[in-house]
Image (cartoon, rainbow, N blue to C red):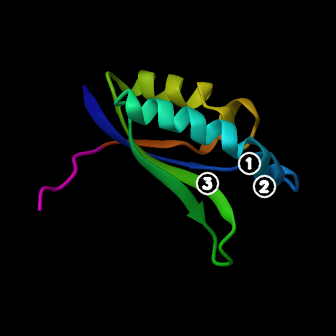
Amino acid sequence: MQTFLVVVHDFTDDEALGRRLSTRPTHLAEATRRRTGGQLVSGGAILDADGKMIGSALVVNAESRDKVIELLRTDPYSTQRAWDLSTAQIYAYREAEF
């Protein structure tokens, strides 16, 4: 199992924020399920200078980069067109021990 840092931005059309907000309860339920299952380590919204949600940052555990992409594709934010997966950046990640 590997750990990955993921940054993915939302679509930028006028309806993108509305899609994100209407999908948020379903997305959070799925995130909770994935966290309980050990796939999702942490996650949260990326905000612009005005505090508007414009994307997400995630730390996930997966067998491969392809599995991370699969996880992203099946997330409600993707299926409901909040996330623009063409912007997804996926990095191998190791958390520092303090």
Q: Amino acid at mark 3?
A: Gly
Left or right placement of residue 31 versus residue 66 in this view: right
Residue 40: horizontal and vertical position, in percent? 40, 37
- What secondary structure is found at the residue carrying circle 1? helix
Q: Residue drawn 69% across and 45% down?
A: 24
Q: Residue drawn 55% across and 52% down?
A: 56
Asked if residue 83 shows in the view, the reply is no
Q: Amino acid at mark 1?
A: Arg
Furthest-bottom residue in this view: 50
Question: Which residue corresponds to mark 1?
Answer: 20
Q: Amino acid at mark 2?
A: Leu
Q: Are marks 3 and 1 in contact (CB under 8 Å)?
A: no
Q: Quadrant of residue 36?
A: top left
Residue 2: horizontal and vertical position, in percent? 26, 31
Check the picture and name the quadrant holding the N terminus: top left
Whether 40 is drawn above or below 46: the answer is: above
From mark 1 to mark 2, how far is it between C-alphas? 5 Å
Q: Residue drawn 34% across and 30% down?
A: 38
Q: Quadrant of residue 30?
A: top right
Left or right placement of residue 79 versus residue 66 in this view: right
Question: Which residue corresponds to mark 2?
Answer: 17
Question: Which residue corresponds to mark 3?
Answer: 55
